[in-house]
Image: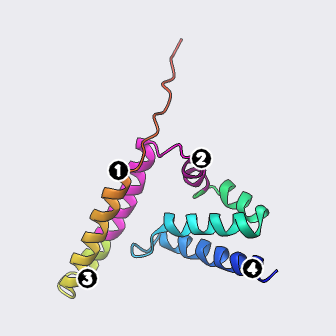
Amino acid sequence: MIKRYTFLTIGVSATGLGMVGVFIPLLPTVPFALLALYCFSVSSPRFQAWLLANRLLGPTLRNIKENRGLSIKEKVRVLLVVWGSILATVVWLLDERPSAQITLLVIALIETYVIARYKTRVEPVEENK
């Protein structure tokens, strides 16, 4: 019983941090969402189903869980959000903290490398008749 509540608490916390990470560049969304997915798989199938059905995180988590990879469109969308938020933060920190700016740019480069190297899912081509 304690194990279940511990995993449930970690899952809820990770979900919250993942949602905040959508808007704050230093909090990575997908790792927190994956942690939440694992914790919910151990503690609450209902919360796991909710997370997989979530409008924002669900499609990406389902693709990762089923080892299908990410489409080019998903990769581009993720990278646009990462670079947009990090560049906005770097501009906001202009002349204040060069070390923080460099750190953020290195984080963006690492995230870009990880996303680019992740398995790419090929979407079926629709034919017009």
- What's under tag 1, amino acid-wise? Arg
SS label for mark 1: helix
Percent x, y of residue 113:
30, 57
The residue labelled by disc 1 is: 117
Does label 3 or label 1 sit earlier along the sequence?
Answer: 3
Q: CA distance from mark 3 to mark 4?
A: 38 Å
- What's under tag 4, amino acid-wise? Lys
Can residue 95 be found in the magenta stretch? no
Q: CA distance from mark 1 to mark 4?
A: 35 Å
- What's under tag 3, amino acid-wise? Ala
SS label for mark 2: loop
Residue extending furthest bottom? 96
Taking depth in this image into account, of 13 and 67 the one nearest to the observer is 67
Q: Are marks 2 and 3 in contact (CB under 8 Å)?
A: no
Does label 3 or label 4 sit earlier along the sequence?
Answer: 4
Does label 1 or label 2 sit earlier along the sequence?
Answer: 2
Q: Which residue shows up at 20% across the image and 84% down it?
A: 99
Q: Quadrant of residue 108?
A: bottom left
With respect to residue 126, does 109 lie above or below?
below
SS label for mark 3: helix
Camera-near label (1 vs 4) is 4
Q: Where does the magenta region start and end? A: 58-87
Tag on residue 59? none
Q: Which residue shows up at 28% across the image and 68% down it?
A: 87
Can residue 86 be found in the magenta stretch? yes
Q: Which residue shows up at 57% across the image and 65% down it?
A: 33
Percent x, y of residue 41:
70, 63
The residue labelled by disc 4 is: 3
- What's under tag 2, amino acid-wise? Glu
Tag on residue 100? 3
Overall secondary structure of the magenta section: helix
Q: CA distance from mark 3 to mark 1?
A: 26 Å
